[in-house]
Image (tube, grey):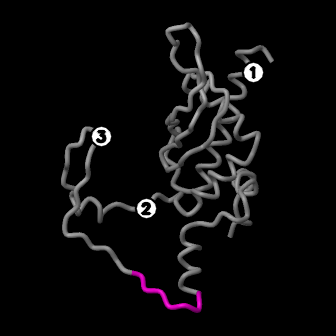
Amino acid sequence: MIEKFSYSVLGILSSSSLGVTCRGDNLQELFDADKGYVVFKFNPSSCMYIDSTGGTHEVDLEEVQATKPDPLSSYTMSLIDGINQSEARRRALILFCITHLSKNAKDAYLLSIDQKGFDVMGKVLGPVRSDGSREYQWREFRIPLREEAHSVEIFCRQLVEMEEKALKSFSNFTGL
């Protein structure tokens, strides 16, 4: 199935480690194994979540049941691994921090992706200390996509377009 993808998708997935598989493949291995496994469905009657201030809130189960999986979820781990394993794509993440977020990043890794954008962990200068020094710190940033990516093809196409635009913008800024 991967062979049917465009060049931009293949370029990212080909950088991914061969040992990384999607969650569905891992579950399929359980079903195909000689040993007997039982899969249970969790059907809660009520759920609560605790927010960052310690307050508890009831979750509307109808909302949870109505949610649909992200269309990129089957490829998330491979895309993240492929981007993080590629030196050129990591440099592009650094450029995203510089051009999209105005953050001078020294290094960057992709944390997560979804149809609306992606989260990057960037190594940026921290606040000025009392002695006037500054150290690099890892911080998480969100970079939205121009439009929702309803397929892996659309996500990768937009990512490549963003990389080209960031490189062009950075080249114009630095006079390269």
Which sits in the foreground, 85 or 150?
Answer: 85
Q: Residues within 10 Å of mark 1 (few under 14, many from 20)?
A: few
- At horizontal 72% and vertical 50% (from top left) the residue drawn is 8
Q: Is residue 36 magenta?
A: yes
**Between discs 3 and 1, the one toward the N terminus:** 3
Q: Residues within 10 Å of mark 3 (few under 14, many from 20)?
A: few
Along the line of sight, which residue is nearer the eye, 42 or 159? 42
Q: Which segment is the magenta one?
A: 33-39
Q: Say whether marks 3 and 2 touch (CB < 8 Å).
A: no
The outermost residue toward the front is: 131
Q: Is residue 42 above or below residue 144?
A: below
First-in-chain label (2 vs 1): 2
Query: From the viewer's perspective, is residue 24 above or below residue 84?
Result: below
Q: Quadrant of the image for the N terminus?
A: bottom right
Regarding mark 2 in the picture, which secondary structure is present there? Answer: loop
Residue 129 picture location, percent across and down? 51, 13
Q: Which residue is mark 2?
A: 69
Residue 52's label in the rendered image is 3
- Mark 3–mark 1 Cα distance, whole angstroms, equals 41 Å
- Disc 2 from disc 1: Cα separation: 38 Å
The secondary structure that dominates the magenta segment is loop
Mark identifier at residue 171:
1
Front disc: 3 or 2? 3
- Secondary structure state at the residue bearing disc 3: loop
